[in-house]
Image (cartoon, grey):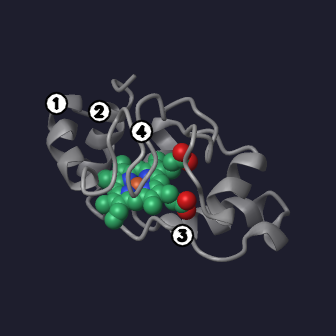
Amino acid sequence: QDAAKGEAVFKQCMTCHRADKNMVGPALGGVVGRKAGTAAGFTYSPLNHNSGEAGLVWTQENIIAYLPDPNAYLKKFLTDKGQADKATGSTKMTFKLANDQQRKDVAAYLATLK
Ligand code: HEM
């Protein structure tokens, strides 16, 4: 995992995200270690919000697993928690990142953001 390479990958995320402010997507500074759906002042989808309420805390590892298909990841998280009834609707994050190395590198970069 290479945070410097991840900084370059993060340019794709910057269409919608910044470290320090909400845009189309929530601020990602401090996201590693943060409960899902809790960036101050951001209005999340019920799916993202409910995942946090069900215990999802972002780690490098689960961000790597989330990025190929955010919607599927969150629905599976809730279903595995026995809360399939809360896995309603879709995440507002429509972007997907398939490349495994890029996902590892961007997760390492996110961990450097405060
Ligand atoms: C949510 C990461 C690209 C739009 C999130 C979350 C993470 C994340 C970790 C959950 C945040 C939380 O629970 O507080 C990334 C990364 C990206 C990326 C690492 C690039 C590799 C994008 C792009 C868009 C986008 C390009 C817009 C086209 C959103 C939106 C949400 C979100 C709208 C809120 C989802 C919801 O409320 O359902 N992103 N994102 N993201 N992202 Fe991204």
Q: Which residue is mark 4?
A: 28
* CA separation in Å, label 1 and label 2: 7 Å
Q: Quadrant of ligand 1?
A: bottom left
Is 81 on the left-hand or right-hand side of 77? right
Q: Which label number is shown at residue 109?
A: 2
Does mark 4's beta carbon lie closer than 8 Å to ligand 1? yes
Residue 49: % across, % down = 68, 54
Q: Amino acid at mark 2?
A: Tyr
Q: Which residue is mark 1?
A: 4
Do the numbered discs 1 and 2 sit on residues whose CB atoms are within 8 Å? Answer: yes
56 to 71, vertically: above or below: above
Residue drawn where x is 65% and y is 77% of the image: 89
Q: Amino acid at mark 4?
A: Leu
Quarter of the figure with residue 55: top right
Disc 2 secondary structure class: helix
Q: Nearer the viewer, residue 90 or 4?
A: 90
Q: Amino acid at mark 3?
A: Asn
